[in-house]
Image (spheres, grey):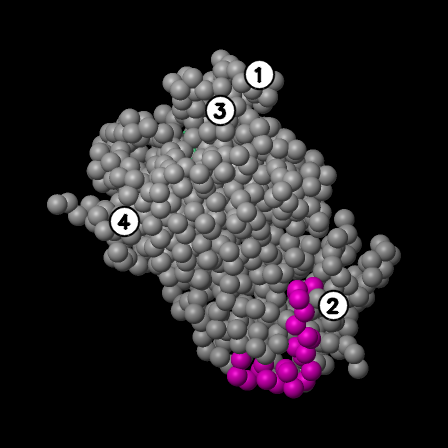
Amino acid sequence: MSTRQMKLGLFLWATGHHIAAWRHPDAHVTAGIDIDHCIKLARTAEAAKFDMVFCEDAAGLREANVNIASQTSRSIGFEPISLLSALAAQTERIGLVSTASTSYNEPYGLARMFASLDNLSGGRAGWNLVTSASPIEAANFGATGLRPHADRYARAREFATVVTGLWNRRAAGHDGESFSVRDRLDIPPSPQGAPVMVQAGASDDGKDLAARTADVVFSAAQTFEEAKAFYDDLKARLAAYGRQPDDVKIMPGVAPIVAATKAEAQAKYDALQELIPDDVGVALLSSYLSISDLGRYPIDGPLPELPESEGMKSRQALVIEQARRDGLSIRELARYFAGARGHWRVVGTAGEIADELQARFEGGAADGFNVMPSWFPGELDAFAKLVVPELQRRGLFRKDYEGRTLREHLGLKRPV
Amino acid sequence: MGRHMHLAVSLNIAAADGQDVLDFGQISAFVRDLEAAGVDMAIISDSAEAPSSSPFEATTLLAALAAVTDSIGLVASASTLAHQPYNLARRFASLDIISHGRIGWNATLAQNPREAANFSRPEGFSDDDFRRRAKEFINIVRRLWIGWSRDALLFDKASGRFHDPEKMHPMNFTGEFFSVRGPLNVARSPQDRPLLVMSGLKQADLDFAIRADVVLLDKRQPPEARAACEEIKRRAHEAGRDPRTIKMLAVADARQERDGGSLKALCLSSGCDGIVLTVQPRADALKDFVERLLPDLEQHGFAKAKPGRTLRDRLGLDEDGRS
Ligand SMILES: Cc1cc2nc3c(=O)[nH]c(=O)nc-3n(C[C@H](O)[C@H](O)[C@H](O)COP(=O)(O)O)c2cc1C
């Protein structure tokens, strides 16, 4: 029997990953301003031996339409690097991964910030590199608007090269297209050598950057086939950069709803779906499709033909593919999508959920999963209490941490 | 006598290559000692003109310190060259929420020559440009901090309104150096605005200093400090601000101070509201400060403010909803 075990991340986000999470009667509605709540969630994940806590980020509001935004809990939250630095002082083993944008930062500053988080946590930090696809963010950093996808990735490639060079103490000095840096990094390496590099790009440019620089890749895939295709594609790109398949851990998102019986789990899911206002669901879907006015099409009609976007090409394709495949109306798609934003949802008992995870893990479609609880704290607690022990019983997940650093948890080499 | 003499301690963690550096345990133990002694705030900075080998950056360190302290004010220096205003405003608003209202930003108007070279500005900034840019930056940050009204968050599960859409205000700012739409995606923080601490002021900046909550008057002789204090307070008054709501702190070097008496004299003769003592980032210097100077400072009437709900309360500053 192989001793390969799956990796688990806890994807922390506001009141939960379901768009109506905050309306759940037991959801902790002040999550975005309550540090003690966040500490509690991180400790729950640590007690369950998760590899890491992961924080998303955007440098701006998520939703342009104020009326829609005000019906969600996503317009306010902690800036994640400060949040994780505070969590570093309140946890001991769990990895701490923050998102940060290559479009609205400078490499020297970002390298310092993450090196500091890495030292504060004794070698548990990771950086999820994003290029930031939203025009709302762009408007907080100048008047020229969102840059095209290819330009953002060109900048991101240079950015990543500079940052890893600084962390790994390669020769000082960089004078490139977008950035110039004169000195070496003035912060020494942590016990894990350098923060773990995470990426979630899914376009060709995105996957290529991941193959070149990432230690961990997050993805969004509904079906086994999609997950497997992504997995094989990304792993196949590694050789070109002199890397082994095992050098990168691929962790698709999963939004589980678990209960003692399947019917109970389904009832929990249905109750959450009932809390989604139609205008919110449609707006959310529109924003992920990068079109502004899905609301003007009949809500019970099919998805219209859409132009390819400069935002998130891959995500758009995924959503469209699903609508066509299942013959979903805009309302149905919006509701379905609102739950986990195109991520994989599993509803069932601990055994059923473990079966599903095991099938993807052993079927070569995942090295682990980024767990996206529908609402906090309830669905995290349920996953930790019911699903984790089942995975451990099957030998699929650790019973205790093997090491102290995030690289050790993930079984990654130290950078050279 | 009702007047408190405030006491702040400034620790620049940057240590030259090869020197011993402080680890988190040492820094947090020191800050907890300051807290126990009633020191109003610790001011952390992380950069020197020579490259440092300290393991931490100031704002991330501040977040971790916030998580292991309860009442002391925590201020970090952060450069207007090393950050974008939107990002910096988010970071400090978050820190203020994490610390339950104990945070300040030390915005220096003096340029660190290393920064431009490492932040893709090899041509550098003239001093004049740097200051104009810094002032625009600070004004943006101050406006971003109050982009959400205090009562904006409704949390109303039944009606489905998380926040009141009328109470979230974009700023739509376009200036000489920056263009920022806003609002922040961080809630209004407990102090409305984290404390704005200014340092590195020149004579020409004194008008601008009336936006500060705390001004650090460094490297000045008492008469000169007194003149600067009076000048800032006068200008604040002229601009319609209660001069008592700007606290002036005279900077002194802990290495050169023998006792609390001379510091009290400095504080009084310079007309300041208190002092900031700079402490060297070495274990022996921290120990010496805590064991020798700190008790003597307490004896002489420093650090006697009642811990308030927030750092503003503690310093006797108003809530800051001004625009
Ligand atoms: C699990 C997951 C988390 C992500 N988190 C963020 C985030 O926090 N901020 C962000 O701007 N983008 C985030 N993304 C988007 C990706 O970085 C990426 O832009 C997207 O998958 C589209 O790929 P592309 O950039 O290659 O077109 C996330 C994606 C996934 C799958």
Q: Is residue A212 magenta?
A: no
Q: Which residues are magenta?
A: B290-312
Which circle marks residue B316 in the picture?
2
Residues at marks 1 and 3 touching, judged by CB atoms closer than 8 Å? no
Q: Are marks 1 and 2 on the same chain?
A: no
Is residue A65 visible in the rendered image? The answer is yes
Q: Chain of mark 1?
A: A
Is residue A116 visible in the rendered image? The answer is no
* Residue appearing at x 54%, y 63% in the figure: B66
For this orientation, the residue located farthest to the left is: A1
Quadrant of the rendered structure where residue B300 is? bottom right
User: How far apart are labels 4 and 2 at the CA level?
Assistant: 56 Å
Q: Are marks 4 and 1 on the same chain?
A: yes
Q: Are marks 4 and 3 on the same chain?
A: yes
Q: Secondary structure at mark 3?
A: helix
Neighbour tally class for label 1: few under 14, some 14-19, many 20 plus, Cα within 10 Å: few
